[in-house]
Amino acid sequence: MVEQNVNTFKDAPRGARAVKALSKQQSYCEGTRDQAHTVPASCWIDLGFEYDAIDVATVLTTWPSVAVAMTVDGEAIGNPKKQSKGPYEISLTCASETHVGYAMANSLYLPPLPVGDHLITWTITFGQEVDDGWNVHPKGEVLEFTSRLHVVKQG
């Protein structure tokens, strides 16, 4: 079977409504890797992934060893890190703490999906031991995040 790449874009068209498929702040604050969202069928989907570290030097030296793979309904998105950007300052405020540091990210948008349920999966693999200043990730560790999207008709 030949694997097809999902058609993604760096930016949504001008004036398009876009919704995030995974909220970094929600995921970090709640400690969950699985989320569900209901979105209108006309919305573009923001598939951006963000990797954080405590300072600029750490984010720049550890980002190359983080492999990111993404799928939409089982179809691969080719080389999601190709369009990486950063580092930039981040601040995630949760009920009990604020997470301040720097991030590298990719920015990808998916055209509107058909009505129904869809599964988006991010698989992050660490190619070497990574200490981001908050957590240590051993070489070979794999983290998987999912967003279940319930696409509904508008109106």
Image (cartoon, helix red, strand yellow):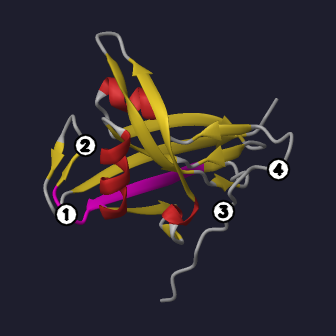
Q: Residue furthest front?
A: 57
Q: Position of residue 1 (x, y in %)?
A: 48, 89
Q: Which residue is mark 3?
A: 8
Which residue is painted at 30% across and 46% down in the image?
58
Query: What kind of element bears circle 2?
Result: loop
- Determine which of the numbered discs, if any, sits on residue 132 in the image: 2
Q: How many marks?
A: 4
Query: What kind of element bears circle 1?
Result: loop
Q: Amino acid at mark 3?
A: Thr
Q: Tell me, yes or no, whether the highlighted magenta stretch contains residue 54.
A: no
Q: Nearer the viewer, mark 1 or mark 4?
A: 1
- Determine which of the numbered discs, if any, sits on residue 128 in the image: 1
Query: What kind of element bears circle 3?
Result: loop
Task: Find the distance from the CA under tag 3 to the CA under tag 1.
Answer: 28 Å
Q: In this rendered view, identify the residue nearer to me: 55 or 106.
A: 55
Q: Which residue is mark 4?
A: 13
Task: Find the distance from the CA under tag 1 to the CA under tag 2.
Answer: 12 Å
